[in-house]
Image (cartoon, rainbow, N blue to C red):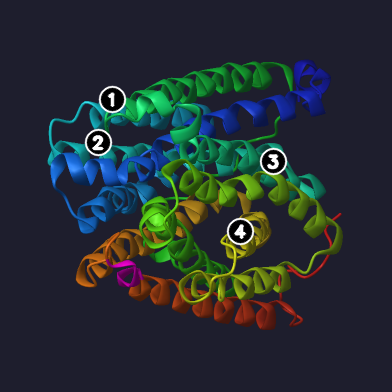
Amino acid sequence: MSNLQIEKTQPTAFYRWLILIFISLAMFGNYYIYDSIAPIADLLKAARDITDEDIGLLYSSYSIAAIIVLLGGGYIIDKFGTKISLFAFALICTLSAFITAFAPDQNVMLVGRFLLGVGSEPLIVAVTTSLAKWFKGKELSFAFGLNLTIARLGSVAADNSPTWAKSYYGDWQSPLFIAIALAIICLMATIAYWILESNAEKKFALGERSEIDKLDFKNLFKFGLSFWLIVGLCVTFYSAIFPFRTFAIKYFMEAHGTEREFAGMLNSILPFSAMIATPLFGLLVDRIGKRALLMAIGSFLLIPTYLLMTYTNISLFIPIAMMGISFSLIPAVMWPSVAYIVEEKRLGSAYALMTLIQQVGLAGMNWIIGSANDFSNASLHNPTGYDLGMWIFTSLGFFGLLFAYFLRRSEVKADGHGLELKKN
């Protein structure tokens, strides 16, 4: 070992948290772009005479692209490192925002959303992998939670844009110009991360890079039972949350008679509550463990929320608040848990595989819910047409609880990975 290597120290806490801020800003811009369609869904339908199924396809095309690229994206991250990967994926996201905003028709807009999926989901995997690289042990869950807090501010900003950017909502296109600006911020944040990591490689002892896990499909599917149960919970949970958010503003306006600004505010409660509660849940799980149990609790809370909105006159704040707790708790526990059951050199591929399967669910469910709304003629004049979709969401909550139950049964055994234990 050379004298230079001996003199190198570990990165300071300030340096690591500064890195977290920049990669979280990249996520902020990414989340805003993704959620920028929901507030203009009815404007798009009016301007281009499209259906709910077409709106769902704008989100499904994103997920289809993610399915195609995620395994390769995980390999790129493992092969070339996080700094190159983050910049490349953010550049693709920025290009997609331009194409979507200036699309002359629905087909070109689908291309833009497809391209967003090509860049966005691997970007999220790269950020997740980077967090696992820079934060260890008892800091990990809190770092994941804080990252999601900043990222979801992008969703909150998009949902509330009919209020703070009301002057832009005279047509469907102007709000998407804001998405372009946020995409540029996303790109600039990845450049800042590149500079910081390059500097850290010179000044700090970051350790030797692990041997790169090859993109071998036979090995990819050799992850243990606990990993696959987490994947099952992941796909059912997110399929119940994000397709609901796709149509939520339109649903609140047409089924509950709210104004666009209030509907956007209601939809923003989910990411806003997660901004506050996710890091707190991260701190809690670092202290008490009980990861599988907490995932089961989060899944259970999700089950009654859609039926309360459909069949009762209860304030919409109550079921949305319940959904917000679930939306905060499960991600705070689920994503860091993977880092405890998968070896570090395979994390890029593990997170990519997990996110890929999640996107399979989202691609199918966005289209299914849009088609269900069209089949039932859901509209301002027929609000009960939304009931079929709400029952579909409810059934996903039951499946999520089932996966969490079997995960806990697996982890309390002697050969478990310690998900129910505190980490030092």
Badge 2 marks a residue whose secondary structure is: helix
Query: Are the residues at dot 1 and dot 2 in contact (C-beta closer than 8 Å)?
Result: yes
Amino acid of disc 4: Phe
Q: Nearer the viewer, residue 423 or 223?
A: 423
Residue shown at 36% from the left, 31% from the top: 93
- Residue that badge 4 annotates: 317
Tell me if I can see residue 206 in this picture.
yes
- For disc 1, the marked residue is 98
Q: Is residue 373 shown in magenta?
A: no
Element class at badge 3: helix
For the residues marked 2 and 4, what is the alpha-carbon distance in whole angstroms?
34 Å
Counting residues from the start of the chain, the first of labels 1 and 2 encountered is 1
Residue 81 appears in the picture as rendered: no
Q: Which label belongs to residue 112? A: 2
Number of residues whose C-alpha sits closer than 10 Å to that of mark 1, classed few (under 14), some (14–19) or many (20 or more): some
In the rendered image, which quarter contains the C terminus?
bottom right
Q: Are marks 2 and 3 in contact (CB under 8 Å)?
A: no
Considering the image in quadrants, where does the N terminus appear?
Answer: top right
Disc 2 and disc 4 in contact, CB within 8 angstroms? no
Image vertical order of residue 37 relative to residue 374, above or below: above
Which residue corresponds to the image point at 81% horizontal and 29% vertical from the top-left?
13
Per the rendered image, the range of residues in magenta is 382-386
Return the disc, 2 or 4, that comes first in the chain's sequence: 2
Residue at image position (66%, 31%) is: 20
Closer-to-camera residue (86/247): 247
Find disc 3 in the rendering and name its residue: 146
Give residue 244's quadrant in the image: bottom left
